[in-house]
Amino acid sequence: MLPEKFQVCEGDLSSELLQEYLKADCLAMDTETMGLIPQRDRLCLVQICDRQGLVTAIRIKKGQTAAPNLQQLLEAKSILKIFHYARFDVAILKYTFGVETTPIFCTKVASKLARTYTQSHGLKSLVQDLQGVELDKKAQNSDWGSVDSLTPEQLAYAANDVLYLIPIKEKLEEMLKREGRWELAQRCFQVIPVLAELDLLLYSNVFEHQS
Ligand code: MN
């Protein structure tokens, strides 16, 4: 099922949607790609959701290297960008458009710091535990490159990946504050662009003792 307020944009956000999203204090974001290697696997879709549940999926064309409206949103200092495993999304957005996404909240990092009672930190487990909602992840490994003919199932999946991130962020923030780990979480989020940049340069373990 698609959310009530859902739109698809081609190549970039429309200026109307940009103006709407610029009013937000935080936005949930996600990307769909051809795979996990930015240098090989292109960005296909960028999803955005605000507190009101307004969801937009932006289709990215093959070879596209700029999306100025999206860039303005990603670099807007007044808007917290919430991702699940931000390290990957921030890397592919930097690789594709040269954008420096900031500020960042990562629900996966927050979950690992706060939910020490479990080892399940995937989005599905997080949404199940904190929102009591069963996410359908069947379309996760599908062909996101066929942008002219994304199926309703793919679009619903893409929308659902951003729909619960803001309420989850609120709950994780509450837990982190309660457990005295909020400051540490903030500092972890600030490191994410550095990790993303190291990933793009194919460094794998500069912080490890082993070479
Ligand atoms: Mn996703």
Image (cartoon, helix red, strand yellow):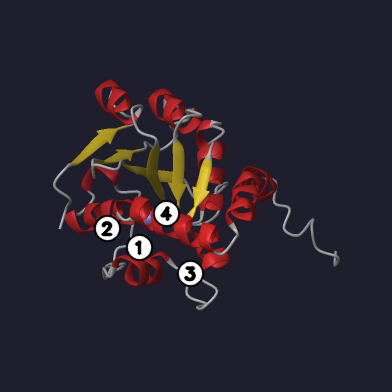
Q: Nearer the viewer, mark 2 or mark 4?
A: 4
Q: Residues under labels 1 and 4: Cα distance?
A: 22 Å
Name the N-terminal-most of marks 4 and 3.
Answer: 3
The amino acid type found where label 2 is placed reads Tyr
Please identify, in this view, whether the residue under mark 1 or under mark 4 is nearer the observer.
4
* Crowdedness near tag 3: few (<14), some (14–19) or many (≥20) residues, C-alpha within 10 Å: some
Q: Earlier in the sequence, mark 2 or mark 4?
A: 2
Q: Are marks 1 and 2 in contact (CB under 8 Å)?
A: yes
Q: Which mark is residue 121?
A: 3
Q: Which mark is residue 157?
A: 2
What x and y, as percent, mark residue 137?
A: 31, 67
Residue at 72% in and 58% down: 204
Left or right of 63 in this view: 49? left
- Quarter holding the N terminus is bottom left
- How many neighbours does mark 2 have within 10 angstroms: few (below 14), some (14-19), or many (20 or more)? many
Tell me the element at label 2. Answer: helix
Q: Name the residue at 39% across, 24% down.
A: 69
x and y, in percent, of residue 173 in the image: 47, 55
Q: CA distance from mark 1 to mark 2?
A: 7 Å
Image quadrant in which the C terminus is located? bottom right
In this orientation, does residue 201 appear? yes
Q: Which residue is mark 4?
A: 169
Disc 3 marks a residue whose amino acid type is His
Of tags 2 and 3, the one toward the viewer is 3
